[in-house]
Image (cartoon, rainbow, N blue to C red):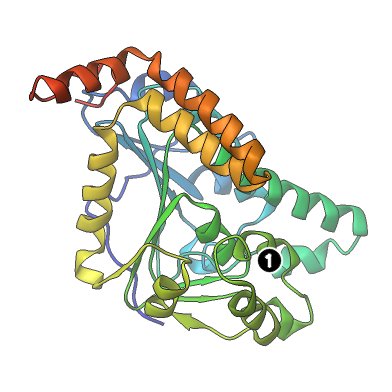
Amino acid sequence: MPSATTSTNTPSTSTTNPASTSNTASTAASTTATTALDTTASTQADSILLRHDAQGITTLSLNQADQFNVLSMQMLDLLIQELENIKQDPSVRVLIIQAEGKAFCSGHNLKQMRQNPEHAYQLELFNRCGQFMQALLTLPQPVIAKVHGIATAAGCQLVAMCDLAIASEHAKFAVSGINVGLFCSTPAVALSRNVGRKKAFEMLVTGEFITAQQAQEWGLINHSVPAADLDKTVQDLAVKLCHKPAGSLAMGKQLFYQQLEQPISQAYTQAAQVMADNMMLADTQEGLDAFMQKRVPSWAQTAS
């Protein structure tokens, strides 16, 4: 496996409770602030997910490198909690999800799953994972997956559920549960909505890895870039999105995912309603006026 790309804004660890800092840690003009997410569980959980805020961009870093950043029940709870915090924070304009260590995410914690063999536990785990994945779609802010190393099973699912994904050219992707006898049914939901049916099913039944280049060609990620360029490419995209009007982005993202599940006539009806609503936003009116007056728009809702 390739070594992990080192982030230029890798957060430091503290034991500050994020609930008490989320209102002040991220403002559009704030200086960089980093906190380790806290939980009422054990001290170990305090640092398995890191949050970094700077100039409207929030980065969540999976921080269990020794376990290849598995999506344990504990990790899922922290992610769900933090997405809810971000959803309520208008100063957050873009979310980046990345990981520490050699892997992006290797999926669920198989040891934890075997230690809790009850059907009720398994169902709760997969439902909790689905709750997290769907929360990414309902988040008003755009979500970018920054991928290095391997992204397997639920890790590949995570990449597929993010709005945008950029990966190191050395990254690899698989839905490999079938290799241990567990068909990746929940990852299939996300994968089949990104990749063509034949390609998705091939990945699901063979469990084989695909390269970052293949992932780009098949539609799983947006771009495959040299490892040395990964940080800058993701940062540049995040900054670009920060300078778009937040209200329009939120409305557009919501409509984009809703219309995919609708008949075309219903999709057009809803899209017309959303565009009309969008026209009522002050930022939209400013944007149109600026275009006609040949000047740069002055958005009310952008990161400085």
> Which corner quadrant holds the N terminus?
bottom left
123 is higher (above) or lower (below) than 248: below
* Residue ID for mark 1: 188
| Amino acid type, mark 1 | Ala
116 is higher (above) or lower (below) than 87: below
Which residue is farthest left?
294
Q: Which element is circle 1 on?
A: helix
**Quarter of the figure with residue 292:** top left
Q: Badge 1: few (under 14), some or many (20 or more) residues near its Cα, within 10 Å?
A: many
Residue at horizontal 68 percent and vertical 66 percent from the top:
188
Residue at horizontal 88 percent and vertical 64 percent from the top:
117
152 is higher (above) or lower (below) than 263: below
Name the one closer to the observer, 120 or 114: 120
Residue at horizontal 37 percent and vertical 78 percent from the top:
213
x and y, in percent, of residue 70 in the image:
58, 62
x and y, in percent, of residue 283 in the image:
30, 18
x and y, in percent, of residue 167 in the image:
36, 66
Left or right: 216 with respect to 8?
right
x and y, in percent, of residue 145 in the image:
42, 55
Which residue is farthest right?
119
**Quarter of the figure with residue 234:** bottom left
Q: Is residue 21 visible?
A: no
Q: Is residue 152 visible?
A: yes
Query: How many numbered marks have been drawn onto this rendered protein structure?
Result: 1
Left or right: 154 with respect to 64?
right
18 is higher (above) or lower (below) than 126: above
Name the one closer to the observer, 237 or 218: 218
Name the one closer to the observer, 143 or 125: 143
> Which corner quadrant holds the C terminus?
top left
Left or right: 147 with respect to 236?
right
